[in-house]
Image (tube, rainbow, N blue to C red):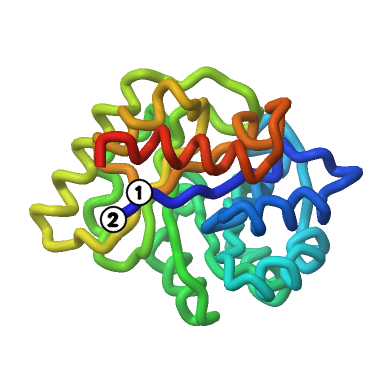
């Protein structure tokens, strides 16, 4: 799989959010990544379904997937609202879903793509039973809740082990998305390990260059060993 780039709006300028998302879409973003935080599961609060609904016309017109990453307690309560707002994929944390299979099926029943997320200290084995049911696994390479953190080096080994597991089980179509501390310096290492989607906020929205140029530069760095 060729690497896909998912700009995270957590690092965007919210006074110019629509404009910057349009620039990201025009610059070749494959997904737009929306972090939803509740101030309980993670130490931050962000946005809700209204922002997802506001972004949907931009992503729909370009055929870009709008993905919502629910870093919240009891996500099953809000999944219908985010589906109605226009999310194309909803990703939930293993750590917040005591009945993970039920939550995954809830998302699928709404006609959406589904992902599951692991925090850095959560064992890969917690995914064993759910892997055949999902489209994507999101590996957090920082502790969630804050932007601009440094990539945890042990994440690379986790990505490689997950990719090997997926191959062995005939689930090579499941995407591995990585979120946290991704830069031009480590993008190739991450994709070489088996990641297929890179979530990036700081490298795309906080560089002095244009958003499309930053996306192109990150993609080139990630693909350099192809």
Does residue 199 appear left or right of residue 192 in this picture? Answer: right
Residue neighbourhood size for the residue with mark 1, other residues' Cα within 10 Å, grouped as few (<14), some (14–19), many (≥20): many
Residue 222: % across, % down: 38, 37
Residue neighbourhood size for the residue with mark 2, other residues' Cα within 10 Å, grouped as few (<14), some (14–19), many (≥20): few
Answer above or below: position of 6 versus 119: below
Let me know if residue 94 appears in the view: no
Question: What residue is disc 2 on?
Answer: 1
Residue at 56 percent across and 32 percent down: it is: 144
Residue 133: % across, % down: 31, 68
Question: Of 21 and 38, which appears nearest the observer?
Answer: 21
**Are the residues tagged 2 and 1 within 8 Å (C-beta)?**
yes
Let me know if residue 171 appears in the view: yes
Question: Of 16 and 72, which appears nearest the observer?
Answer: 16
Q: Find numbered disc 2 in the image and state the secondary structure of the residue it sits on.
A: loop
Residue 90: % across, % down: 54, 62
Question: What residue is disc 1 on?
Answer: 196
Q: Find numbered disc 1 in the image and state the secondary structure of the residue it sits on.
A: loop
Residue at 43 percent across and 73 percent down: it is: 105
Residue 132: % across, % down: 25, 65
Answer above or below: position of 102 versus 115: below
Does residue 87 appear left or right of residue 122 in this picture? Answer: right
- The answer to which image quadrant residue 37 occupies is top right
Residue at 66 percent across and 51 percent down: it is: 24
Quarter of the C terminus within the rendering: top left
Does residue 20 appear left or right of residue 161 in this picture? Answer: right
Q: Residue furthest left?
A: 168
Quarter of the N terminus within the rendering: bottom left
The number of numbered discs placed on residues in the rendered structure image is: 2
Q: Which mark is residue 34?
A: none
- Precedes in sequence: disc 2 or disc 1: 2
Kindly report the distance in space between the C-alpha atoms of the residues bearing marks 2 and 1: 6 Å
Residue at 60 percent across and 46 percent down: it is: 7
């Amino acid at each position: 799989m060729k690497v896909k780039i998912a700009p995270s709006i957590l690092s965007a300028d919210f006074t110019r959010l629509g404009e910057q998302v349009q620039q990201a879409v025009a610059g070749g973003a494959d997904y737009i990544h929306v972090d939803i935080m509740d101030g309980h599961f993670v130490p931050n609060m962000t946005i809700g379904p209204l922002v997802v609904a506001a972004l949907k016309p931009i992503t729909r017109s370009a055929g870009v997937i709008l993905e919502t990453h629910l870093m919240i307690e009891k996500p099953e309560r809000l999944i219908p609202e985010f589906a109605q707002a226009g999310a194309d994929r909803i990703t939930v944390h293993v750590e917040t879903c005591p009945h993970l299979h039920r939550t995954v099926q809830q998302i699928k029943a709404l006609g959406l793509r589904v992902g599951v997320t692991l925090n850095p200290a959560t064992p890969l084995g917690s995914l064993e039973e759910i892997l055949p049911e999902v489209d994507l696994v999101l590996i957090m390479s920082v502790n969630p809740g804050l932007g601009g953190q440094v990539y945890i080096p042990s994440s690379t080994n986790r990505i490689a082990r997950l990719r090997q597991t997926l191959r062995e089980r005939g689930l090579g179509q499941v995407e591995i998305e990585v979120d946290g501390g991704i830069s031009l310096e480590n993008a190739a290492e991450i994709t070489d390990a088996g990641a297929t989607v890179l979530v990036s906020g700081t490298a795309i929205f906080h560089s002095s260059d244009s958003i499309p140029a930053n996306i192109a530069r990150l993609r080139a760095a990630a693909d350099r060993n192809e």
